[in-house]
Image (cartoon, helix red, strand yellow):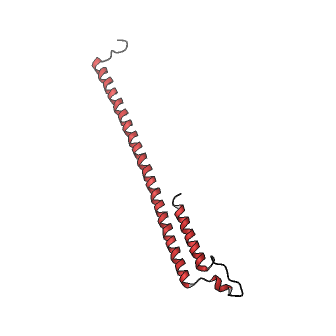
Amino acid sequence: GRAEAPALAACDLVASASATAIGLDRPTPSSSSSSPARAIAPAPSSSLRVQHLEQRLDEYVRRQEAAQALDEDLRKQDALLRKREQYLSYRAKIAERTASKRSEGRARLQQVEARGPAPAPGA
């Protein structure tokens, strides 16, 4: 997604800087003009620059991963809050139904009691 593009751009930047530092972006000299070891070995200052860029890239990637983890945690927290609200709403509806049934039961009981005792069967 959106976090991958800056990370890939940063990787390209480090790869480019690394290639520049070790001379891969320049044509290699002919074997007669220079030794192969000299063309491959980076200069000390370039190596430090590459290490610095790699550290910055590592820090950037760590920050991006932390931000993604926080975003995921927030999404999970929101989902849990929605589920909690749904559960509380469900509990309120059940409590309403229960209270309504109890009220109806009490009303019926009062009607039965108001009629008086029921005649005994066969009497």
Q: Position of residue 49 (x, y in %)?
A: 52, 79
Can residue 96 be seen here?
yes
What residue sits 55% from the left and 66% below the top?
9
Residue 116 quadrant: top left
Residue 50 quadrant: bottom right
Q: Position of residue 30 (x, y in %)?
A: 70, 84
Q: Where 5 falls versus 29 (above or below)?
A: above
- Please state which of residues 111 and 24 is positioned toward the viewer in this rendering: 24
What residue sits 68% from the left and 83% below the top?
29
Can residue 116 be seen here?
no
Q: Where 70 falls versus 28 (above or below)?
A: above
- Taking the image as shown, residue 55 lies to the left or right of residue 25, namely left
What residue sits 54% from the left and 62% below the top?
5
Q: Position of residue 60 (x, y in %)?
A: 49, 68
What residue sits 32% from the left and 17% below the top?
118
- Please state which of residues 89 and 19 is positioned toward the viewer in this rendering: 19
- Taking the image as shown, residue 112 lies to the left or right of residue 12, namely left
